[in-house]
Structure formats: structure tokens, C-alpha cells
Amino acid sequence: MANSISVIKDRCTGCTACVKACPVNCISMVDRPADEGSRWKKLAVIDESKCVFCNACVEVCDNLGEKTSNKGTFKAIVMVKETVAGKPEIDTASYKGVWCYGEVRHGKLVSTVYELLFLGKKLAADLGEPLSAVLIGKNVADQARDLIDHGADKVYVLEDPMFENFVDELYTNALVDLIRQEKPNKLLLPASTIGRSFASRVAIKANTGITADATELSIDKATKLLHATRPSFGGNLMATILCQKQRPEMATVRPMSFPRAEKQSGRQGEVVRVTVDASKWNIKTKFVRFEPEKGDAQDIAAAEVIVAGGRGVGGAEGFACIERLAKVLGGAVGASRAAVDSGWITYRHQVGLTGRTVRPKLYVACGISGQIQHLAGMGSSDVIVAVNKDPEAPLMKLATFSIEGDMFEVLPALSKELEKRKGS
Amino acid sequence: MGIHIVVCIKQTPSTNNIQIDPKTGTLKREGMAAAINPFDEYAIEEAVRIKERVPGTTVSVITMGPPQAEESLRDAVARGADGAYHLTSRSFAGADTWATSYTLYKGIQKIAQVKGKVDLVICGKQTNDGDTGHVGPGVAAWLDWPNVAYVRKVEAVDDQKIVVHRMMEDGVDVLEMALPAVMAVVKEINEPRVPSLKGKMAAKKVVIPKWNEDDLGCDKTNIGLSGSPTIVSKSFTPPPRTGGQRIGGATVDEKVRLLVDKLQEAKLI
């Protein structure tokens, strides 16, 4: 028997609460036929083929049913879940501790690990379990001390010349072998290119569930489960994901979602050197070379300040004043799809649905109207400043601060003012 | 000698159609048209380009989804794919990325049975509704094939290997994978062409096999909602960003001074 879900016509008031609750957009409101004689005009219809049977609509409707005095209404959705013999149960209690993956790039720790340690420390405290970090790389043992100073109780070091560069298969095998051996309870990775590349592969090999790109994470007091909340649909919908029966519960965490752990020099901690046995791995990927990005331009993913340009920039040369302001603010240069598609700037700068997602403390949008596709990539920035000639542009209304004006006048003036105050 | 490429696609709500409800500031979910996930268009195009580079190559396209997802498979054929396969069953519904990767893996194995050995699987880097980017690497994990995600360029490809450029935060990694292999591509890799007339004709005629869990020989504890390690426990619309402050002022310099004051107050500079 497959899962099924249906609406009891007589109980549905057409209130649309279920439509709003549905994470997959499978409920719509249709007009009831005039001859039906119902006092309600609308009826909820559920597209069963899209339904993920998450129970959200049932809960909402049942709650309304509890509150209403008209007992003939609400509690209108009936869901029957298939009872399939589930996966073999594992002994979840034997999995202990919170792990943070410390990304290393060209011999250096990437700052995302400090954000993971900040978060991991809180989760570990709520669980009453230790916090560990994992380092995979060529010469990484020296970094272990730094991770202990930032809150790790234990650091696993997987050091080998073959780990010099990130290769999905290699890193997956290394991490999965360690998971099987050490059995962590929760595992956090950065939602960076590397983290997002191999975390899913790790989850499948380790036979467990993973949440992508989480921005809020907590431990449930009663169940000790990880509640990982993530934006989907370009940030227009938040979903809280649980992995109830498999371990470790995994999540990649969006950069800039948490502050960095503070350094406490001289903390006590243990460094565990892990012996790696690669004899059974059969790696079929070869790292050829690295081509660094030209210039000293900061990447947008981990930038605290981004100055971005859109259609209003008008051409490649127009980005000069954006670059200058970015430099004064110590930030990175972003762009809208319109600017990238026009060939004014390269794709790696593109913020938005078909580009990259960023979460800086300050996002300065210049000549960007603020289509929903762009908002999807930067809507969670702490403070947004919009500069646009058109006061009616959507972003001008959403921005924390907006200035109506020509960006080619405003930006140079802004750079100058900032330099002046820096100097004084 | 040509290779056999399978492109994994998903039908998702069309991004061109996303609208915000002006009253509530939230996503309007009614009446969104469905289309091929935008990143998958680049995956299809790259497969067709490899077909042009490596004579004798065949491009198959696969999706897991409800009956109406067949439209997206026909669209893929119109864009140059040679054949299309539809994994569809009520039992697949509610799958997370773990169960979806498993089902696609079983589908790719089935395509290999009926159409011949598969050498390369191409996915888009992520979908525009789920945004996880997990399914491409997940399929690679099930197949136990090498995988590179965030591919922005195919430097070389033949029937033995593929050399790809991966977009990193600090530059580009160049990697070589022995075939069979999996890659997930970003938008920068190409510019998808519009369907040709010939393609549209082929799309009309193509016979699309529909396979369910029994056709694929799935382990039923690995599919759909019950086979998914993760569940959505709740979902909600985030509070809309409320409009802020219009910085007034008679001159540009005055506006700028006021803005910098605000930014200083907020300790941003």
C-alpha cells in the first residue's frame, strides 16, 4: 500500500492554512461548485503525486480544529502512511560526540571551521558530549593546536601526501572510515564548495541522513536530536530537518551563519593521529593542477562586506567604482545575473539563484533592482544598502538603508567619505 | 568511439514564474509553471556538446518524478537528448536526497541494461527548489564512481577519461577522472541553445519508458519517504524583510554622510 492523503470535503473551510504550511507546494484551493450548497467557497485539493507526507498540513488543520468552537470544521486532512519494514535499526546510543570538519585549503585552515566550532561547542554542551575536529590534508598536524584553542576537546589528524589536494573520493573514504571507527553522534561540515561536494557522498557511504546548507541548528532537549533548519526555494521557505534513526546526523552549515569561536590559548585537548589505510580505496580521480584566481580579489562566499553591481552599472568599466568602494570597505565584489550575462564580470561573482548564496554583514547593492532571483542569494545579509536611480525598485523598498541617486555620483562620494573618516 | 551519457534532470517550479505576494511578502505558490531545473539545462547542453566532440556518443536523460514530469523529459529530447527514461511511482514520493540518489542509481543501472554501458553521468549543480546539491555526488556514491561537482569547463574527454575544471572559492582545480564518472555542472559551463525544430519533432515522437520500483528491482527500504533517513519536521515562511530607511538629503554628499553615520552606529565600519 502506498501513502495516501485526502481532504474531508465537509470539514474543509477553505482557510488556506494548509497551503501555507505545505513545504512542497502541493496544496491548492479550488472553488467549490455553486450547486454543492456548502457555506464555504473554497476547498483544499492535495496533489498526492507531489506530497511528501510530512504531516505539516495535518498538524495545522488539527490545531485549528482544537481551537474552534465549531466542532464540525477543520481536522479535515487524513493521511495514511505506508508501513514498510524500515531500515535495519542501529544502536544510536553508541554514537557520541559532536564533530566539526576543519577545511584546509593549500595548507591553511579555512575560517569556516571557527564558525563550526562556535556552533559545535553549544551543541556539545547541550548534549553533554565532547567536541572534536577532523583535519584531512598533507601537512595539517600543526593546525590541531589552534583548533583546541578554539574549543575542540579532541582533534583527529589524517595526514598523508595524497591528501594535498581535495579529491572527492579520497576525502570521502578517509572520513567514512573514521566515522565507522569512532562513531560520532553529530557531524558538521561547512557548506563550502568542498563541504557541499563530498558531504553527500559521505552520508551515503556512512548510510545516514544529511541536511544541506543549514542556517539554524539546535539540539532538542527531550530527544537529543539535531534540528537543522535550512532555507529552500531561494530562501522563501524554511524547513527543519531531522534524521531520527541513523547516525551521525550530518549537516553542512552555511558560511557566515554563526560567529567565530573565541581563542583561549593553552586549552587542554587531545591530538589523535589517525593511520590511514588506503589500500582498498581504488581511487579513479587524479588531481592535475590548481589555477589561482587572478589578482587579490576576495571571494564573496566568506566576505563580511560585499559591494555588488547590477544592470545599472552599464558596462565592465562601470565596475571600477564598485571595486574601489569594496576596497575601501575591505569587502568583495558581487554582481547580479544581468551584469554577469552581459559579460561585464565573471560568473564567480554572481549572487543569486543561479549564482551563489552569500550572507555578509553588509551588502551594498548598486544599480540592482532586486528581482526575487537575486534576493534568493543575498536576502539573509545582516544589513542591506541599496543605491538606485529608481526609488520604486524592489530592493530599494527592502533594503535597511536606501539612497535614491546615480550610483556613479553616490559611490565615489561614499568611498571618499569613508576614507576621510578612516583617516581622522 | 562514442560514449553513453546519462543526464539526470528534475522538473521544478519555473524560476521565471516565482512571484512574491505583495500583501504578505511571501512566496506565491499557486499557479507556478513547471520547467526543467535551470542548472539541468546546462547539464543537457554539455552532454550534447560532448556528443558533438566525441562522435558516436549517445545522450540519455532520466528523471524521477510524478507523471507530469514527462514534459521535462520531452523538452530534454528537444534540446538534443537521444532517449528519455521516466522513474515514476507513488512509492518514490517523499524521497530525500539519499533515497532520490538511490532511485536514480537504480534507474541508471536499468538504462545500462536496456541501452548499453553508461560512461558518464551529468547533473546540474543543484535544483532551484531543494537547493541541496546532494543528488549528483549521491548518485556517484551509489555507483561507486569518481565524481567532481561545480564543474565549469570540460577540458578534454574521450572514451577513457574526462578532464574537468572545478570552480573553487580561490580559483580553479583541474581534475582527471577515469570513466565511468559523474559530474555536476554550474551555469558558467555553457550557454544552452534553444530547442531546434528537428529536436521538437523528435520530442513529440520519442517513446519514454516508465519504470517503477519493481521494474528497477529497488530495495523497498531505500525508496520514497520510508526509505529516507531525513524527514521535514516542520516548514515555515520566514518573516519577510521589512523595508528600512530611505536616506534623504539635499545633496549626494549629505546623503552619503548620513549613510556613513548609520553604518558607524551599526558598527559596520
Image (cartoon, coloured by chain):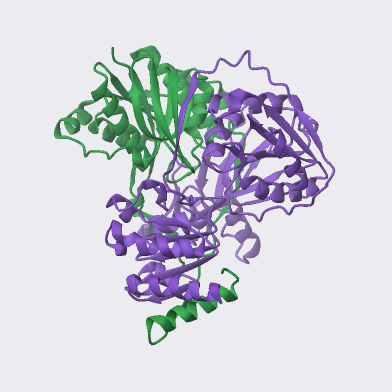
In this image, A133 relative to B241: left or right? right
Q: Specify the quadrant that holds the C terminus of chain A.
A: bottom right
Q: Quadrant of residue A147?
A: top right
Q: Is residue B51 something one can see in this rendering?
A: yes
- Spot the residue most to the right: A268
Q: Pick the residue in front: A232 or B164.
A: B164
Q: Pick the residue in front: A208 or B4.
A: B4
The percent coordinates of residue A71 (x first, y second) are 61, 61
Q: Specify the quadrant that holds the N terminus of chain A.
A: top right
- Colour of the chain lettered B: green
The percent coordinates of residue A265 (x first, y second) are 80, 50
Q: Please tell me whether residue B248 is drawn above or below residue B26 in the rendered image.
A: below
Q: Pick the residue in front: A28 or B29.
A: B29
Q: Which chain is rendered purple in the image?
A: A
- Spot the residue most to the left: B197
The percent coordinates of residue B78 (x first, y second) are 23, 33
The percent coordinates of residue B149 (x first, y second) are 46, 33
Q: Quadrant of residue A133?
A: top right
Which residue is painted at 23% across and 24% down in the image? B52
In this image, A79 relative to B153: left or right? right
Q: Please tell me whether residue A207 is drawn above or below residue A143 in the rendered image.
A: above
Which residue is painted at 19% across and 31% down in the image? B199
In this image, B111 relative to B214: left or right? left
Tell how many labels: 0
Q: Is residue A30 something one can see in this rendering?
A: no
